[in-house]
């Protein structure tokens, strides 16, 4: 087919060349026009006036023989020198020659294509490419966007690095975008653009190549419509000294740029293990939680201890390497609802500049899927499992999770279909040992600088194995509001800074009242915040008075309920099993409060499995 079309193209070109410049037209030029014009026209059809006007002296009927009609040939008898031809004629000659050449070329190409198969031609092209590359002083490296079915971390890093550092300096063309809800613009190198960079005194060039994907092929998930890659060109001589160090430099620079300039990202696995076009099971949204350690209502000493621990962790690369420990740390946040566990996670993320992965365990179908989710997290991140006691049954290592989702066929994390049920259904849900491996197994070390945070309202329901050091290194009890914590909330919501702001004895008395009643009221920071929000327009003094009333009411209610409960206990323990259970839970939550005066933070240090033994006050 190709050969045919080429042949017809050759024929077409030759025809065009002929039409553009027929031989007759070539000779009908200049001074010879008048005497020569009769030749191509039939003398019978030519009208006399036209013939006359073209011929000069009129032809007489006597000169009717063909020989007599022929004039003396001006070309032969008096050849016109080429230089003296008019410009237009010369141009025509050039075009004719060019068209003939093209025709010949197309003809030859058609013959070649017909004779040599495509495979042979490709092999020759490859050979030629290799030869020219061998002679070139440069070598080239491709950094593709997709590495097999998953995304290539280096591609992202190069893109970030080039667009933030090298590209603006070089004046390259940049694509500009702002992801939904993001607060800053993102620059990217446009397709087919090049940018130069230098490292350790050597110059390198990056090119961004974007090509449409030829076909989707067979895949359970859609692939990106374009194939993108960066091509790095460096001199052969610089290759060995440059490559590893330069790539390390790019990765480190990209991580730093991300940390400094980018919004925190909050990832969720709400798609239930299905992967997106770039092979990621996580959906990111900008993380905009404004909570910081400044706004977090907590005893200042405990807060300082947590911040110091986080600081040590983030700067502890050398320490973790020296001691042979995986660079990760686990925090367990426990306490009643509304005491600030989520706020604490946000404060940690904002303090360290880490992304947050909010792992929804009920969306995870199996231990293998859990492991793969872990592998798709990045370093410098906090992996959160909230209300872990509600997510899975964590009391038996071998038993599959009771609260795991009902088996259902769905696209697996690898892109394949996972069909639950049947003989292998036990392996289709998360077990405690799967979760233990997640936090402390070999796979948990596949990235660096990661923090695991588990939250629960019922610490007593958790298996001690989950709480041991190495998994949950620090146990943080989020308590009811204490007076120092309450002062932080007064500052946040009313702008109350110091006692000096109080207007006289009455307001001073209200503040002392708050101090006196806050512990007895057992009120959460969330409830205190609510009272202050409601009354913030009434002024500082009025809002504080309102809060004092609420505290007193709560304390009285507690006292009454306490009295009622003990009376019931005395009269034959009439309070049913439900009440008993409630009391038990309450006692479990209150137990850490015994140590509240000291710190309220438990740090596990010796690896004992027993929670009680493992808990040590910091
Ligand atoms: N310690 C705190 N410091 C500052 N604000 C707090 C604190 N605790 C609670 N709040 C306020 O109460 C709201 C709810 O708090 P948060 O969600 O952090 O509590 P939680 O302990 O995670 O609750 P739950 O266990 O129900 O998830 C927050 O938006 C915040 O405004």
Image: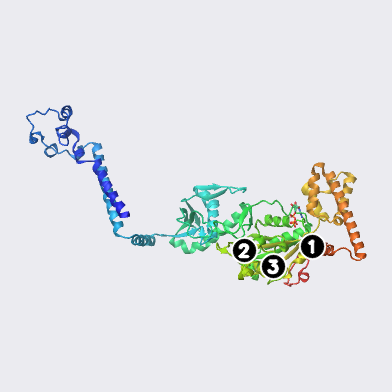
| Residue at numbered disc 3 | 471
User: How far is mark 1 from mark 3, CA to CA?
Assistant: 19 Å
Q: Quadrant of residue 55?
A: top left
Q: Earlier in the sequence, mark 2 or mark 3?
A: 2
Where does label 1 land, which residue?
600
Residue 374's disc is 2
Residue 49, x across and y down, in percent? 17, 27
Residue 264 in percent (x, y) is at: 64, 53
Question: Splitting the image into four quadrants, where does ligand 1 fall?
Answer: bottom right
Whole-number angstrom distance, CA of label 2 to CA of label 1: 30 Å
Q: Nearer the viewer, mark 2 or mark 3?
A: 2
Q: Determine the secondary structure under disc 3.
A: loop
Mark 2 residue element: helix
Alpha-carbon neighbours of circle 3 within 10 Å: few (<14), some, or many (≥20)?
Answer: many
Upstream in sequence: badge 2 or badge 1: 2
**Residue at the (48%, 50%) spot, across then down:** 191
In front here: 301 or 419? Answer: 419
In which quadrant is the C terminus drawn?
bottom right
**Left or right side of 69 for 246:** right
Q: Where residue 287 sits in the image (x, y, percent)? A: 65, 52
Which residue is more in the foreground, 576 or 388?
576
* Badge 2 density bin: few <14, some 14–19, many ≥20, Cα 10 Å: many
């Amino acid at each position: 087919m190709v050969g045919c079309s080429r042949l017809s193209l050759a024929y077409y070109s030759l025809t065009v060349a002929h039409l553009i410049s027929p031989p007759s037209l070539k000779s009908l030029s200049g001074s010879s026009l008048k005497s020569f014009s009769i030749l191509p026209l039939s003398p019978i059809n030519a009208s006399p006036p036209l013939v006359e006007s073209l011929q000069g002296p009129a032809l007489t009927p006597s000169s009717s023989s063909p020989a007599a009609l022929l004039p003396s040939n001006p070309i032969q008898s008096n050849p016109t020198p080429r230089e003296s031809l008019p410009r237009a004629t010369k141009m025509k000659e050039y075009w004719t020659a060019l068209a003939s050449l093209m025709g010949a070329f197309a003809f030859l190409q058609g013959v070649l294509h017909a004779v040599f198969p495509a495979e042979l031609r490709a092999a020759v092209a490859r050979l030629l490419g290799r030869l020219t590359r061998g002679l070139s002083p440069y070598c080239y490296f491709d950094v593709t966007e997709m590495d097999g079915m998953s995304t290539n971390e280096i591609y992202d890093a190069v893109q970030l690095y080039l667009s933030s550092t090298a590209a603006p300096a070089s004046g390259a063309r940049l694509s500009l975008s702002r992801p939904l809800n993001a607060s800053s613009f993102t620059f990217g190198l446009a397709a087919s653009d090049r940018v130069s960079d230098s490292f350790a005194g050597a110059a390198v060039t990056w090119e961004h190549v974007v090509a449409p994907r030829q076909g989707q092929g067979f895949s359970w998930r859609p692939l990106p419509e374009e194939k993108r890659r960066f091509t790095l060109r460096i001199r052969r001589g610089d290759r060995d000294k440059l490559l590893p160090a330069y790539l390390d430099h790019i990765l480190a620079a990209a991580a730093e740029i991300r940390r400094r300039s980018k919004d925190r990202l909050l990832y969720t696995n709400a798609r239930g293990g299905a992967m997106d076009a770039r092979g990621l099971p996580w959906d990111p949204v900008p993380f905009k939680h404004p909570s910081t350690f400044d706004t977090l209502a907590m005893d200042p000493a405990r807060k300082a201890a947590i911040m110091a621990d986080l600081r040590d962790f983030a700067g502890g690369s050398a320490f973790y390497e020296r001691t042979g420990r995986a660079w990760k740390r686990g925090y367990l946040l426990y306490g009643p609802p509304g005491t600030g566990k989520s706020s604490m996670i946000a404060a940690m993320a904002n303090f360290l500049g880490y992304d947050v992965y909010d792992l929804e365990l009920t969306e995870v179908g199996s231990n293998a899927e859990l492991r793969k989710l872990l592998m798709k997290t990045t370093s410098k991140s906090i992996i959160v499992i909230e209300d872990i006691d509600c997510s899975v049954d964590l009391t038996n290592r071998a038993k599959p999770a009771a609260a795991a989702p009902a088996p259902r066929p769905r696209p697996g994390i690898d892109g394949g279909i996972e069909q639950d049920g049947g003989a292998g259904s036990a392996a289709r849900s998360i077990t405690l040992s799967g979760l233990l491996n997640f936090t402390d197994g070999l796979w948990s070390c596949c990235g660096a600088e990661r923090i695991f945070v588990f939250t629960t309202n019922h610490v007593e329901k958790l298996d001690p194995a989950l709480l041991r050091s190495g998994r949950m290194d620090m146990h943080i009890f989020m308590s009811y509001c204490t007076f120092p914590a309450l002062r932080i909330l007064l500052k946040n919501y009313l702008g109350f800074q110091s006692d000096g702001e109080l207007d006289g004895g009455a307001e001073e008395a209200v503040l002392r009242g708050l101090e006196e009643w806050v512990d007895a009221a057992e009120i959460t920071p969330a409830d205190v915040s609510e009272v202050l929000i409601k009354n913030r327009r009434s002024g500082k003094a009025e809002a504080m008075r309102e809060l004092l009333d609420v505290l007193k009411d709560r304390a009285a209610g507690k006292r009454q309920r306490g009295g009622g409960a003990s009376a019931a206990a005395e009269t034959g323990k009439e309070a049913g099993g439900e009440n008993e259970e409630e009391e038990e839970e309450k006692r479990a939550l209150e137990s850490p409060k015994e140590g509240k005066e000291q710190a309220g933070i438990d740090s596990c240090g010796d690896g004992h499995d027993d929670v009680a033994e493992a808990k040590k006050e910091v």
